[in-house]
Amino acid sequence: MPSQRHSHLVEAIDVIKSLGLPAKLQTDLCGNVLLALCSLKPDSSWSQITNEWIRIHDILQFLKDNYNIFYAENTRENIRRDALHNFRNAAIIEDNGKATNSPNYRYRLTEECLILLQSKGAPEWAEKLEAFNGSHQSLIQIYTSKADRLKMPVKINSQDFTFSPGKHNQLQKAILEEFAPRFAPGSECLYVGDTRLKNLYINEQKLQQLGFQISVHDKMPDIVLYQEDKNWLFFIEAVTSVGPMNPKRILEINELTQSVSAGKIFITAFPNIETYRRFLVTLAWETEVWIANTPEHLIHLNGDKFFGPRQ
């Protein structure tokens, strides 16, 4: 990182301040991210900025290529959390509604913010800034409502929740609404994540009672169901692109549940047979496969034993 701010970075931080964002966002990181979102190069002017859809990887590459600023790939989550998430909440940017773990997930300036920032440094800047700030709260409501319209309603233990849009969450919704009633009747959902909210629902008290070491949330499977009458736990991974129940994943979950005495059932859920075929050779033995578009059936990778926990 350079020791002093280049001129466009100073201007970008001034923009953030002018938009009324808190001091914690008036940083070099947020300023640099804004420059990348604008595709504002050192020899360009604000009047030339654009709002093309870009990924976090594109932000890193833009800053490296144009400003000789290097952020490591493992800083992506910091950029998402500290800059992009706050920009989106302030209706400065929008996302394209994909799941955050999708390679097609992208961000761009909102049209309103693009028009404003194109006037930065021009005589009309102050007037347009005043108009933008005057309508800022309504813009936040508009973009929040737009995101809300894309969300999927889902019942979790008879309570109403919403999933963020995306194929992964569509599959999770199918697991809860199609798989569970068929193959885990009467079961209770103890954990389910969302592509934007990692712990959308978690019953920590019940998990602790069952013996979970719940301090390591990053190792939790996508969905955990508990069927009390059989004392069975269902560990379910929803797979659209990554993360099947392979031997490594089984080992991780077993480490997480060393003190759990309930029977353990490991399931990989796929949206369709084509996705299942891509992962077939990686799946662990002694697991189950459920395919959402043929919901009445299971594929057992259990040799001489059908559905049930293995001891």
Image: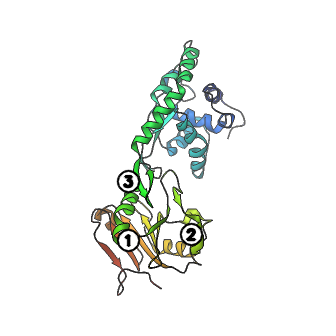
Q: Position of residue 178 (x, y in %)?
A: 34, 63
Q: Earlier in the sequence, mark 2 or mark 1?
A: 1
Judging by the rendered image, the residue that carries numbered circle 3 is 167
Confirm whether residue 99 shows in the render.
yes
Q: Mark 3, mark 1: which one is toward the viewer?
A: 1
Q: Quadrant of the N terminus?
A: top right
Residue at 55%, 66% in the rendered image: 219
Q: Position of residue 305 (x, y in %)?
A: 36, 85
Alpha carbon distance from label 3 to label 2: 27 Å
Crowd around label 1: few <14 · some 14–19 · many ≥20 (10 Å): few
Answer with the quarter of the image where residue 171 lies: bottom left
Crowd around label 2: few <14 · some 14–19 · many ≥20 (10 Å): some
Q: Secondary structure at mark 2?
A: helix
Judging by the rendered image, the residue that carries numbered circle 1 is 185
Q: Position of residue 173 (x, y in %)?
A: 39, 57
Q: Is residue 243 left or right of residue 207?
A: left
Judging by the rendered image, the residue that carries numbered circle 2 is 207
Q: Secondary structure at mark 1?
A: loop
Tell which of 141 and 108 is nearer to you.
141
Residue at the top extreme of this rendering: 123
Tell which of 166 and 203 is nearer to you.
203
Q: Amino acid at mark 2?
A: Leu
